[in-house]
Image (tube, rainbow, N blue to C red):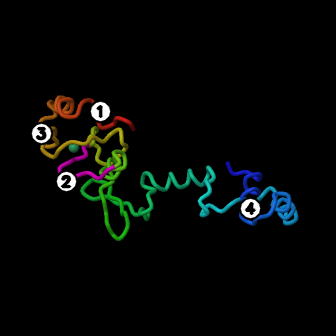
């Protein structure tokens, strides 16, 4: 934990002086309550900073995301930087799975609304399975159960 005691001790260690001296200096400069070690020293990030970092690494707030969002053929596409556009539903699924999808894998919209990219509406299947699904809706549920189990890809969040 980063508190003034630890901070003072660290500073004392670094400076080779005793805590009292450090404390006196901090007091002198009005630092006793405000002093903290900058984030880039390897000290623990404050919680607010950690939240910010976590947020920036997930969802469409990832570091490459520059705000570009459009549609193409009824799908939402996202500008991930350097003029590269990716299908949002595939991005959402990739982030959900924590890996990239192969070209063999298709992300299906369960409710068939191609702009509903909520993870709960998305499902990974092979291209051929996906074709079968759309060719014969009645078999869709059976195919899902047979090949993927019910909501198998949702395991572990
Ligand atoms: Zn589909």
In the shown orientation, is residue 132 left or right of residue 119?
Answer: left
Q: Nearer the viewer, mark 1 or mark 3?
A: 1
Q: Nearer the viewer, mark 3 or mark 2?
A: 2
Q: Are marks 2 and 1 in contact (CB under 8 Å)?
A: no
Q: Tell which circle, 1 or 4, labels the residue nearer the N-terminal end.
A: 4
Element assignment for label 4: helix
Q: Is residue 15 above or below residue 104?
A: below
Q: Residue at x 27, y 59 (%)?
A: 72
In the shown orientation, is residue 69 left or right of residue 38?
Answer: left
Whether ligand 1 has any atom under 8 Å from the Cβ at mark 2 is answered as no
Measure the alpha-carbon separation of dots 1 and 4.
53 Å
In the shown orientation, is residue 88 left or right of residue 47?
Answer: left
Q: Which residue is mark 1?
A: 151
Alpha-carbon neighbours of circle 3 within 10 Å: few (<14), some, or many (≥20)? some
Measure the alpha-carbon separation of dots 4 and 3.
67 Å
Q: Are marks 4 and 3 in contact (CB under 8 Å)?
A: no
Q: Is residue 45 above or below residue 41?
A: above
- Highlighted magenta segment, given as a residue range: 99-108
Q: Is residue 127 above or below residue 83?
A: above
Q: Which residue is mark 4?
A: 11
Q: Which residue is mark 3?
A: 132
Q: Tell which circle, 2 or 4, labels the residue nearer the N-terminal end.
A: 4
Q: Tell which circle, 1 or 3, labels the residue nearer the N-terminal end.
A: 3
Q: Quadrant of ligand 1?
A: top left
Which numbered disc covers residue 109?
none
Which numbered disc covers residue 103?
2
Alpha-carbon neighbours of circle 1 within 10 Å: few (<14), some, or many (≥20)? few
Q: Residue at x 50, y 51 (%)?
A: 54
Closer to us: 2 or 17? 17
């Amino acid at each position: 934990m980063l508190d003034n005691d630890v901070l003072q001790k660290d500073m004392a260690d670094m400076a080779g002086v005793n805590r009292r001296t450090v404390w006196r200096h901090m007091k002198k400069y009005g630092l006793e309550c405000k002093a903290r070690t900058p984030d880039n020293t390897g000290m623990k990030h404050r919680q607010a900073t950690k939240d910010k970092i976590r947020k920036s690494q997930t969802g469409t707030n990832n570091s490459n995301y520059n705000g570009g969002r459009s549609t193409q053929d009824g799908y939402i596409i996202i500008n991930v930087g350097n003029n590269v556009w990716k299908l949002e539903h595939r991005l959402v699924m990739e982030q959900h799975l924590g890996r990239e999808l192969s070209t063999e894998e298709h992300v299906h919209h369960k409710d068939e609304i191609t702009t509903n990219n909520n993870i709960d509406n998305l499902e990974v299947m092979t291209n051929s399975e996906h074709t079968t699904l759309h060719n014969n809706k009645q078999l869709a549920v059976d195919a899902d159960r047979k090949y993927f189990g019910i909501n198998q890809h949702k395991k572990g969040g």
